[in-house]
Amino acid sequence: MEKKKLLEVKDLRVSFFTPAGEVKAVGGISYDLNYGEVMGIVGESGSGKSVEAYSIIGLLQSPGKVIGGEILFEGENILTYDEKKMRAFRGNSVSMIFQNPMTCLNPVYTVGNQLMEAVLCHEHVSKEEAKKRAMEMLTLVGINNVEKRMKQYPHEFSGGMRQRVMIAMGMICNPKLLIADEPTTALDVTIQAQILELMKELKEKIQMSCIFITHNLGVVAEICDKVSVMYGGRIIEQGLVDDVFEHPAHPYTQGLLRSMPRVDAESYERLIPIEGTPVDLLNAPQGCPFAPRCEHCRRICLDEMPDYTSVGNGHQSACWLNALQALEGGSEVA
Amino acid sequence: MKNEEKTLLRIEHLVKRFDVSTNAFQKEYVHAVEDVSFEIKKGETLGLVGESGCGKTTLGRTILRLYEPTAGKIIYDGQTVFDKAASRQPDMFDFRKKMQMIFQDPSASLDPRMTVGDIIAEPLDVHGLCNSKKERTERIHQLIERVGLTQEQANRYPHEFSGGQQQRVGIARALAVGPEFIVCDEPISALDVSIQSQIVNMLEDMQAEMGLTYLFIAHDISVVRHISNRIGVMYLGSMVELAESFELNKNPIHPYTKTLLSAVPIPDPKKSRQRERIVLEGDIPSPVNPPSGCKFHTRCPYKTKRCEEETPAFREVEPGHYAACHLI
């Protein structure tokens, strides 16, 4: 079955021009996302995962600037859009859910009002129609007593409920792509489980594409079809979730999976940490960003950034180690 | 082995309430910690897990009397730290040399206007543990190297360090007075994933080296289970289950513990698809007006009439495995 591409990012580069110098937050990443697919982007703070998402939706703020590459959404490069076109694009075609629902909802408007605003902004519908849509959405995300809830203010909602409102707001105009930036990070585990179940359910009901940004590998394993692992502004490994988790090819991914204590571990095992500290993008190394912390680091790693090596079905890794293995082993599959 | 069996800290029926009354005639309290009792043996790590607002941090702070307990008893190494029944409470100054704390947010717990060296030496100065300037400098260097930083970094300020390094400074400060018991309050939850394991390993090494006893507080049950010998699960101010960490994982008794364990995402797509998950309805009730009877009954999938009316006792179900639930 041929899947159709919704989003294609080609060699995207984003830099922040700060007084201290140029910070290459995103240093040339490429990926594509098909219709109905959920892709996870994992990485530590400062790996560029949020910046990358902000540039798709055109919310990148000064001093950040896209300095190269293309973002093709249904074949059209959205980086060429002007502000007016971008406004129509945002919300209608792409929308976003943010990490902290309290800071994203306006405290002086009722929840119903804010939900309706999104519809009224983008579509020519009557107020009654917008209200009906808002109530349908709230029911869909599992909020009871909708009539009453519509008239309440954000502070009357709990954290989990607010995040549900955010999800409803993100989906109210039926966008083709939903970007969720750490939507469960601020929540407790039991509430996180509720939200994840909700998102899985919605994924089944409405075939919407989604980019799920998180630092939690467990969340990715649970909800995503594909995953991209970012480090130092680059995607260092990408592939289907099953492949990446079962046969991680890049030393960073391997290290991350090894360093996490697991709730399903059978016995005590000492953790194997990744030594060193995350890369400082202001003085980013010339070669592979992970090289200074990598146990397999060779001279070439410090000098040159490796290209992607295919290590399986659509599973790519940017590491000299994989490139060498591919050269030596011929058709060796990791 | 006999030494390990010795009880270092015992708390009995500890209660902490915060007065949040806005009306002089109608007293209102946040019931942060309600009737919690447990023991910590010398050299062991007791983990405390629970969601935000369950009182785990308050419990940790109350044990060190950073919050004055409302009722109950705290006994450290045979000496009374707090006893509601006594007319006068003991002075904490000497206890502070034995009991220390590592805080959650490393950047907020370090004074931005002091050098890292001075921050680490402050407890030494307060307790007068160094006789000369030379000794003080030596001690700083020793401590800073113990936590994996370099001597030169002692003259820098906290903002020049990354989050992981700041947490190392916080740990060095806690170690300065040579404590026996450390309350680790979410020491790694503010750190990046790849840094967390470095800190966890360091805490384990220090424990083995210096025979430290930890009370390890965190919301992430996988980390707590990794580092702790025993785990206490808290819900809305009460302890609902306490057991050996692997026993708790294999054989959770309380419905809340079961939910908590099943809610943690596993970084393994195949396993997480097969897994049966218990998803709780609703949110944690307000600790100002906690539910009657078993506090968990508003969200419990197995609740009965009795749960609404009667508070379950915290009792030993199997040797060393305690739980508070009517259904067992």
Image: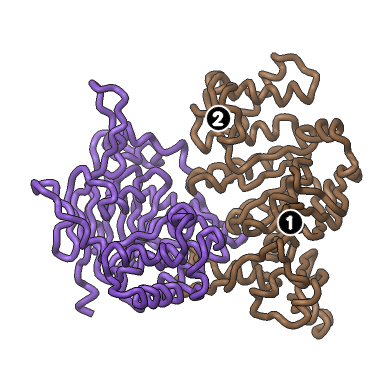
Q: Which residue is drawn at 11% across and 48% down?
A: B88
Label drawn at residue B34? none
- Of tags 1 and 2, the one toward the viewer is 1
Q: Quadrant of residue B117?
A: bottom left
- Comparing A85 with A18, the one in front is A18
Query: Cα distance, mark 1 to mark 2?
Result: 38 Å
Chain A shown in which color? brown
A117 vs B165, nearest the viewer: B165
Which residue does the image show at 49% across and 74% down from the upper left?
A: B148
Give the chain of mark 1: A
The hue in which chain B appears in the rendered picture of the protein: purple
Instruction: Tell me the quadrant of the picture where the N terminus of chain B can be found.
Output: bottom left
On screen, residue B194 above or below A222: below
Query: Disc 2 designates what residue?
Result: A143
Q: Is residue B135 left or right of residue A321?
A: left
Residue B257 falls left or right of residue B29 = right
Q: Can residue A268 be seen in this view?
A: no
**Residue under pointer 1:** A25
Question: What subunit carries mark 2?
Answer: A
- Residue reaching furthest to the front: B133
The colour scheme is: by chain
What residue lies at 83% left-to-right and 70% top-to-bottom? A307
